[in-house]
Image (cartoon, rainbow, N blue to C red):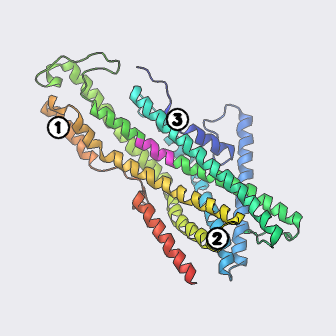
Amino acid sequence: MTITYSTFEAFRPHFNALANVAYFKIVPKPSSGIKHTLHTAYRAVVWFLVIIYNLQHVIRVIQARHSTEQVVNTLFVLLTTLNTLGKQVTFNARIKRMDRLITIIEGPLFAGRNAYDEKVLRENARIMFRLLKMYHGSIYLCGAMWGISPLVSKLSDEVELTGYFPFDTSDWLGFGIAVAFNTIVITLQGYGHVTMDCTIVSIYAQTKTQLQILRNNLEHLVDPVEETGREICVRSTVFKDIEDPAFGVVLKKRLTRCVEHYKQIVWFHEEAEAVFDEALMIQLFVVAWVICMTVYKIVDLSLLSAEFFTMFVYLGCMLGQLFIYCYYGTQVRAESEFINYSIYRSDWVSLSPRFRALLLILMSRGMRSVVPRVAHIVPMSLETYISVLRSSYTLFTFLERK
């Protein structure tokens, strides 16, 4: 059975979205040189806006350093945007390594070979697409509220903007320009940020999906039929790989492919972990502080205010952002822990002791689980997610006492 479905389909919407906001190059590379040049110039403009926006907030923090409340009001935005900038640098400073990951995704070992493979690949792509669209919707909502909230507050009281502006923002013209700039750039950064998050999570999900495909291949390793359903093995009461030498050759090819597939999954996982290691370290540290500061800001707001709704949506994005990493990290670990179980479920009793020894060697490698980690120490798991929430609460109680 010939499968023409491309594994890269699970990533295409993500790279298209990153290219649309100039956070990454166009994938695949455009055939038109003019399009490539224009997109490079567009990326330079976006880099300039992002850096200016972060500098505005750094200056504001320095100006308000003697007021805890004003510092918190600025820091909860600044830390998030610095986190975004860190991921943006990671994606663009390691383009060659990203290209290698994309090559593996599009390679023959990650491609589907039968109906089952295509089914799980399509299902993974569908889930990743829905997750991306859900986060984009959240960002649009949050960005809209980010623009509306200060305008509503301005009607009843003076509003302090989180960033520094080198012009008077007390009048409606200056205030409107400042709010428009903040809204556009924060929405752009939010869109790019969640897209980068969903792209990294898609790599986790692809690792999990490939382990799922590998497990299915191991469970059906000794099946006496081809993928087309044609029998390729004689009925045997002894050892299949000895009584039917031709089938023994097929078995070795199947096992070799499974081993190569497993090696490439492990390499893919380790390479992705190395590429995004620093960005995810910053993520863990920043998210704990941002959740803490957002809650600190929310507790003093009126439940019916526009700012409360904005902060509530923003907090939901922050909580969900870390959750998807930890959830899919747990999924990867769970799938890898069942590799040996899948080998055991195959019809290994019908194989010769020599072939069983090969399976035992593979099982010895399967005893080491594939676990996404940050800094090679902290596992990306639901247990880590709970630990970060506890740390956020600890920081919150510290700020409350201050």
Quadrant in the picture for the N terminus: top left
Q: Which mark is residue 8?
A: 3
Q: Per the image, is 206 magenta?
A: yes
Label 2 near label 3: C-beta < 8 Å? no
Q: Earlier in the sequence, mark 1 or mark 2?
A: 2
Q: Residue at x 68, y 80 (%)?
A: 65
**Membership of 272 in magenta stretch:** no
Taking the spot 59% from the left edge, 47% from the top edge, the residue there is 134
Q: Is residue 1 left or right of residue 177?
A: left
* Residue 81, position as x, y percentages in the image: 64, 61
What residue span does the magenta drawing correspond to?
Answer: 201-208
Taking the view exactly as shown, the residue that stands out farthest to the front is 304
Residue marked by disc 1: 357
The residue singled out by tag 2 in the image is 75
Mark closest to the chain's N terminus, 1 or 3: 3
Which element is circle 3 on? helix
**Residue 177, quarter of the rendered image:** bottom right
Q: In terms of image quadrants, where is residue 169? A: bottom right
Q: CA distance from mark 1 to mark 3?
A: 36 Å
Query: Foreground residue, 182 or 142?
Result: 142
Tag 1: residue type?
Ala
Circle 1 crowding by C-alpha within 10 Å: few under 14, some 14–19, many from 20: few
Tell me the mark number nearer the camera, choosing from 3 and 2: 2
Of the 4 image quadrants, the one containing the C terminus is: bottom right
Q: Quadrant of residue 303?
A: bottom right
